Amino acid sequence: MTGNSCCLATLTYRLVRSDHGRTKEYSLHRTKRAPQDPDVKKCSYTFLVPEQRITGPICASATGPQPDKDRVTRMDIADVREVLNKQRREIETLQLVVDVDGNLVNEMKLLRKESRNMNSRVTQLYMQLLHEIIRKRDNSLELAQLENRVLNVTSEMLRVASRYKELEARFAVMAGVVNNQSILITALEEQCLRTLGRGEVPVVPPLVQVVPQNIPVNNRFTNEIQRDHTNRAFPRGSRMDSPTASPFGLNPPPPPQGTLTSDGPFRDCYQVRQAGHTTSGMYLLKTDGSDRLIQAWCEHGLDNGGWTVLQRRRDGSVNFFRNWENYKRGFGNIDNEHWLGLDNIYNLGKQGDYKLMVELEDWTGKKVYAEYSSFHLESESEGYRLRLGTYQGNAGDSLSSHNGKQFTTLDRDKDAFSGNCAHFHKGGWWYNACGQTNLNGVWYSGGVYRSKFQDGIFWAEYGGGFYSLKSARMMIRPID
């Protein structure tokens, strides 16, 4: 300002600064001067203001700048930033904690689910265990009931066995009485004949006096005999045509019915077995030195097989009271009752060393056997004499007393008795006088029979002379 008087105007400079939302106003006031005189010259001023960025408030005060309590400094900003960083770190830590807690929550959920599944499984196992306990208890009850039933049945079996033994003993006594009564009846008949003066009493063979310890039990006596009664007796020296067609001819027979194979012929059933045939049945045989074909039954179901069946009795369908020629050639049905023929048996036996098996069955279904270590027949000129070895078995030895004896039929008497044993025993056999067995006799049904003579199918050591067996078989096989 110069020495001229100038009017003063009020200069107001207003600064507005916004800091964090707060507005501050700074004013500079200058007092207005008195009105100028028109005659007074005006003066002018020139201000040189350097260009610079105003970073702070411009204060125009007579007393100088006043301290601002609300002023924000860099330190405050640093503190705020530090607080923000600290809070950010805490937030991150909390986020990690939240993540861990979330995993724990998920794991807890899984554990709860597994726990529920485990509880249901435990419940299921418990129910199964309960059912098993109930089942075992029921089984225990059933087992106790079965044990009681077994005890009752056992006691009943013991009682029945005791009763059976008593009845068996009584039956043995009765069988002995029947045997003695038959002998007594025969003696009384002789006395009656003498008393009536009818001449000499015909000589009869002695009855078998053997009464075995164990007689097969059957509850009825019978006189029923075999169904074929035609031509039961023939005059001495007469001939009989076989009522049953003989399968044994002098010429080669037609192809046999029922044979199991087209192989062969074989020398015996043992060779059939060696050829690989294991089924019992009819086969064609041809013995050494003979041109004759033989249709025979081979038994392969007994003692490793290979047995040639010579004779079979089972139902009385064939009459065995026949003449010499029939017994020589053979008769009957190969798959049922039959006699193979003395000539065929002789030719088989001379091929080598054979053993004999006799199989017997009583009317209770029990089977016993008698085996002889050797067997063969002599020629027809010797009456087909029987040759046997030593005995073994469980039927008792009733055939050794016939060893060395010739064959006797109703028309050819070669036994040691004064009469003809074939007439009394109704069959052909190697009779002695007359003997302890008669497997070609009359087939009686039921076991014990009543007859004037002992003409049934009997084996004295098994059942006695008045017990007719249900079935019988004679079989041979080469000696091992």
Image (cartoon, rainbow, N blue to C red):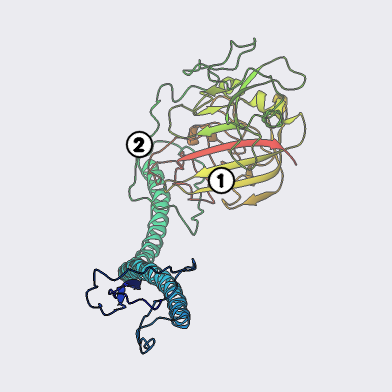
Tag shown at residue 436:
1
Residue 131 falls left or right of residue 460: left
Along the line of sight, which residue is nearer the eye, 468 or 354?
A: 354
92 or 414, nearer to the observer: 92
Which one is in front in this view, the residue at disc 1 or the one at disc 2? 2
Residue at x-position 75% and y-position 42%: 480
Q: Label 1 to label 2, Cα distance in Å? A: 22 Å
- Residue at 66% x, 17% y: name it: 293
Displayed quadrant of residue 17: bottom left
106 is higher (above) or lower (below) than 181: below
Who's the residue at 61% across and 50% down the image?
A: 397
Position above or below: 47 against 365: below
Residue at 48% across, 50% down: 464
Does residue 152 appear left or right of residue 72 in this picture? left
Considering only order in the chain, which callout, 2 or 1, is on the residue closer to the N terminus?
2
Using the image, determine if residue 310 lies above or below residue 260: below
Give the residue pinned by disc 2.
224
As drawn, the label of residue 478 is: none
Residue 414 visible, this orientation: yes
Residue 143 visible in this rendered orientation of the protein: no
**Amino acid at circle 1:** Gln
**For the residue labelled by badge 1, is the local secondary structure a helix, a strand or a loop?**
loop
Residue 66's x, y, as percent?
36, 88
Q: Is residue 58 left or right of residue 255?
A: left
Q: CB under 8 Å between callouts 1 and 2?
A: no
- On the image, the x and y values in percent for residue 256 come to 57, 16
Q: Is 119 left or right of 289, judged from the image as shown?
A: left
The quadrant in which residue 12 appears is bottom left
Asked if 38 appears above or below 182 in the picture, the reply is below
Residue 41, x across and y down, in percent = 32, 69
Frontmost residue, 267 versus 152? 152
Is disc 2 placed on a helix, strand or loop? loop
